[in-house]
Image (cartoon, rainbow, N blue to C red):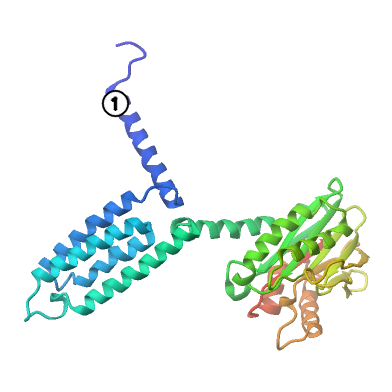
Amino acid sequence: MTGGAETPTARMRKALHRARTSVRKAGVDYFRGDGSDSVALTALLLSVPALAWGTVVQPEWCAPAALVLPIVAGGLLLRPASLLGLYAAAAAALILESAVLDDPSASGAGRVSPGTILVVAAVGFLGLLIAQFRSRVGVPWRRGGTMLFDLRERIRVQSKLPKLPHGWHREMALRPAGGQSFSGDFVVAARTNGGRTLEVVLTDVSGKGMDAASRALLLSGAFGGLLGSLPPHDFLPAANGYLLRQDWDEGFATSVHLVLDLDTGDYELLSAGHVPGLHLTAGTGRWEEKAGEGPLLGVYDGAQFDSVKGTLRPGDVLMLFTDGLVETSERELTEGMDRLTGEADRYVTSGFHGAAWHLIEAVAKDVNDDRALLLICRD
């Protein structure tokens, strides 16, 4: 046997490897919504006569209404055209069961009653509506969940703060309303000016939870593209113009833009209708409100945004947050900020590492609103 010849075992292994690869690729394409639904259709079509046979043989254990099982699965797995074929098979099975089990003395699971037919038909109608909706949107159910997961992860990635040089600490905590996975609050951040400057934008989109999530995703992508591409004082005017061009019915947002010099600790806060930030001065142990002047984003064109300045010295802390953390229908803004500073004072001696999440838990754990808290500390 020559050196290049393959043994039967090697050829068998290659054939099995190709088969596994093909099956894996077909499965991935199917669950992404890119592949054919012929495999699912074949499996569901085979299940229909199997259920019909079970009903004829053991009607007490396999009732005629069991045909709703492949119909429900078909509504989730199949395209509308394939679903009609499955319905035809289910209708034929019901006719066969009715003919075989047509015994006036039978009752319960032993007969195909009008109620059974109505239940199967109603489930089939709902399944067809779902399949037509998915087909019109262009997103199969298998891919729909993945898309939502991808969107959530994109928001989280965009909200990650860049690493800071030695001597600085930053952390971000975000709690959507109602324990959902999507929030109307988001953060975009970047190191600019050769890494010397940290720019962070914390935004609160009108609405909350899922209602504001789609707009938050769109704005986070747009704001992330603007941040660092424009001079700091041009960012909020550009963001305001972007919101105005969207012409949303509920299109306003509040935003605060932090521009921090990591070498000197000097910073500027530019605000668009956002709640004030809080600056802890280590020397005095007091919290000072830092509030820039500016209107909400997306209200009117030509808005001006004036900054407030400060300096973070060693031991100082800057807190930026959204109004859901400090303001509710039962609690005014000043009361909420007093409560936040009171809780934050507990971390002055031990340090604020890991404090952002605990502060939200202590101040606004059960608030039905999006809550976000950003901490910048100079060690």
Disc 1 residue crowd, few under 14, some 14–19, many 20+, Cα 10 Å: few
* Amino acid beneath label 1: Thr
**323 left or right of 293 in image:** left
Position of residue 170 measured from the top left corner of the image (x, y, whole percent): 77, 60
Quadrant location, the C terminus: bottom right
The structure residue drawn at horizontal position 32% and vertical position 59%, both measured from the top left corner, is 83
**Which residue occupies the foreground of this view, 240 or 58?**
240
Considering every residue shown, the one lying at the far top of the view is: 2
Location of mark 1 (residue):
9
119 to 6, vertically: above or below: below
**Residue 150 visible in the current orientation:** yes
Position of residue 279 measured from the top left corner of the image (x, y, whole percent): 87, 70
**Residue 160 visible in the current orientation:** no
Q: Quadrant of residue 178?
A: bottom right
**Which residue occupies the foreground of this view, 128 or 17?**
128
**198 left or right of 5 in image:** right
The structure residue drawn at horizontal position 18% and vertical position 68%, both measured from the top left corner, is 94
